[in-house]
Amino acid sequence: MIIAEHISKIFNDIRAVDDISFKVNEGETMVLLGTSGCGKTTTLKMLNRLIDASSGYISIDGKNIFDQQPEILRRTIGYVSQSSGLFPHYSVEENVSVVPKLLKWEKTKIRNRAQELLEQLKLPLEEYGHKYPDELSGGQQQRVAIARALISNPPVLLMDEPFGALDPITRAGVRQEFLNLPELKKKTIVLVTHDVQEAFELGDHICLMDKGKIIQAGSAKELVLKPTNAFVRNFFDHQRLFLELSAVTFGDIWSITNPGNFDFQDNIQTASHAEINASTSLWAGLEILSNPGKEKLTVRNEEANALKIFTTPGIQEAYKTLKQQI
Ligand SMILES: Nc1ncnc2c1ncn2[C@@H]1O[C@H](COP(=O)(O)OP(=O)(O)OP(=O)(O)O)[C@@H](O)[C@H]1O
């Protein structure tokens, strides 16, 4: 768990980070979101002491980070920066092996672990291990950087715009791979981005920052549906409908839809049906229904141990009702 209390950073006379506090529970991903210059990177770098806070307190897994030597602290925290930050004269294998070597792991252990991780990231060691960063695409370099950050199995991972340098299509692909990485399931992650969609996809919690302050912290749903002020509301205005529908799940509209609208006579195996889980967003559901021939969604709610059938008008109606209730 990461705890930051009243942290500030003043550069000369610039208050880059201004008295912010947050907590990231074990296994959670927290996103620092905001426009350029709002203090995201400075906040992130204070967590592994690449920048020392001017004031405030930070602990990671119960230990005060200021009691630890920065170099030692950084060996226990994975870090991925915006540019991959790979050493250009090191091969892929040498790049990912840097931290385990510092930790004096045995050669075979390092090789096996590098092999395991690079395999997961679709860069098999036999094929890519000997290559140099400039022989790789941007997306591949970024995946090596992720492998390097994960190799010593740190419980905490800090990521600064990790997909920022990639084109939108590669970016979506690498992000999807990242989301599905089994390695990440238990990690405590802090991720910096200015991309709202990325924040919504990856963050359990989002801190929206402006001028060094956290303006609102909460889930994507809370931020987009219950903004605490005009700044937050305006921040999401340009993609509002998409963001709202991405943040609301079928589980959220479950109780306001008619329990009788599941027709048990309906054969849910027919081609006009698709089956999804109640944790799916309304946007993803509507995308499926926009496919020719798909007319109904069978939504399975594991918690309620129930099924319901949804159509596009039914989803729109329920969503309108939900918005009136907020
Ligand atoms: N080393 C430094 N010396 C002086 N000012 C700095 C330094 N690093 C950052 N700043 C200033 O602190 C403020 C916050 O910078 P920071 O890099 O944390 O913002 P950011 O939200 O990460 O921006 P971006 O998305 O552009 O990276 C900016 O005004 C920046 O100019």
Image (cartoon, rainbow, N blue to C red):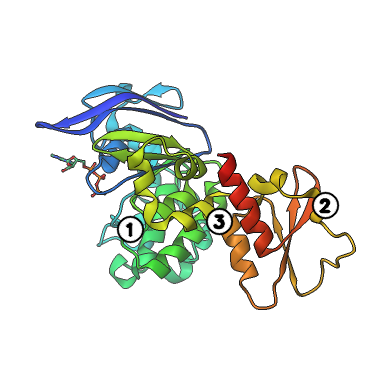
Image location (x, y in percent) of residue 102: 35, 42
Identified at 68% across, 58% down, the residue is 314
Q: Nearer the viewer, mark 1 or mark 3?
A: 1
Q: Which mark is residue 260?
A: 2
Image location (x, y in percent) of residue 245: 54, 55
Q: Which residue carries the number 1 mark?
A: 164
The answer to whether any part of residue 188 appears in the image is no
Distance Cα–Cα, label 1 vs label 2: 46 Å
Q: In the rendered view, does 43 fall on the left or right side of 127?
A: left
Image location (x, y in percent) of residue 117: 50, 56
Q: Which residue carries the number 3 mark?
A: 180
Is 149 rendered above or below residue 268? Answer: above
- Label 2 element class: helix
Front position in the image: 18 or 152? 18
- Label 1 element class: loop
Q: Which residue is at the far right?
A: 265
Q: Earlier in the sequence, mark 3 or mark 2?
A: 3
Identified at 29% across, 22% down, the residue is 56
Is 259 rendered above or below residue 75? Answer: below
Q: What crowding class fits label 1: few (fewer than 14 Cα within 10 Å), some (14-19), or many (20 or more)?
A: some
- Label 3 element class: helix
Q: Is mark 3 within 8 Å of ligand 1?
A: no
Identified at 76% across, 50% down, the residue is 258
Q: Nearer the viewer, mark 3 or mark 2?
A: 2
Q: Which mark is residue 288?
A: none
Front position in the image: 251 or 75? 251
Q: Amino acid at mark 2?
A: Gly
Distance Cα–Cα, label 1 vs label 3: 19 Å
Q: Amino acid at mark 1?
A: Gly
Q: Amino acid at mark 3?
A: Asn
Distance Cα–Cα, label 3 vs label 2: 36 Å
